[in-house]
Image (cartoon, rainbow, N blue to C red):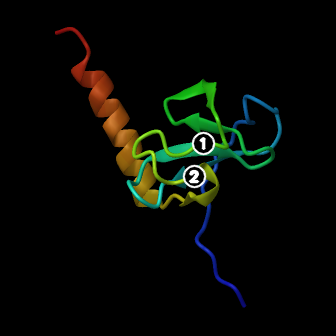
Amino acid sequence: MEVREPSWELKAPCTCCGQGGLTFSTCTNCGDVVFICAEVGTVFAVNDLNSAIDPSGVCRTCNRVAYDDFRNASSDEIQLRLYSLTSTSESNRPR
């Protein structure tokens, strides 16, 4: 029996293919979290589903790990990434 980490996906369809879910994936070196399309492998930043990242490239944060080598993101990594996005957007609001 092979036990694998669970995968977390958006319920909304992929913006590039209209099919399967976008899976939260993590860089094994720096922990950056992105979405990777389960159907065609297109990569998206978590905060921008309209601009695809070259799936044959390497991590945009550390420039070391190929997107093909990213692993499924854990629920803790996803929460941390989403929290950092909301904290950043709140700090940019005018007071």
- Which residue position is annotated with label 2? 66
Residue located at (60% from left, 50% from top): 67
Label 2 or label 1, whichever comes before in sequence order: 1
Give the distance between the C-alpha atoms of the residues marked 2 and 1, in whole angstroms.
6 Å
Left or right, 36 with reference to 59: right
Q: Which mark is residue 38?
A: none
Q: Residues within 10 Å of mark 1 (few under 14, many from 20)?
A: some
Q: Which residue is mark 1?
A: 57
Q: Position of residue 62 (x, y in %)?
A: 40, 46
Expressed as whole percent of the image width and height from the top left, the position of residue 2 reads: 69, 85
Left/right of residue 20 with respect to residue 91 in the rendered view: right
Residue visible at 54% across and 45% down in the picture: 58
Q: Which quadrant does the N terminus fall into?
A: bottom right
Residue at 46% x, 59% y is: 75
Residue extending farthest bottom: 1
40 or 80: nearer the viewer:
40
Asked where in the image residue 3 lies, by quadrant, the reply is bottom right
Pointer 2 with pointer 1, Cβ within 8 A: yes
Farthest-out residue, left: 95
In this view, 25 is above or below 94: below
Residue type at tag 1: Gly
Q: Nearer the viewer, residue 95 or 47?
A: 47
Q: Give the structural element (helix, strand or loop) at label 1.
A: loop
Residue 86: x percent and y percent?
Answer: 34, 31
| Location of residue 64 in the rendering, given as x and y in whole percent from the top left corner | 46, 52
Q: Secondary structure at mark 2?
A: loop
The amino acid at mark 2 is: Ala
**Residue at x 60%, y 35% (from the top left corner):** 44
Q: Quadrant of the C terminus?
A: top left
Bin the neighbour count of mark 2 within 10 Å (Cα to Cα): few under 14, some 14-19, many 20 and up: some
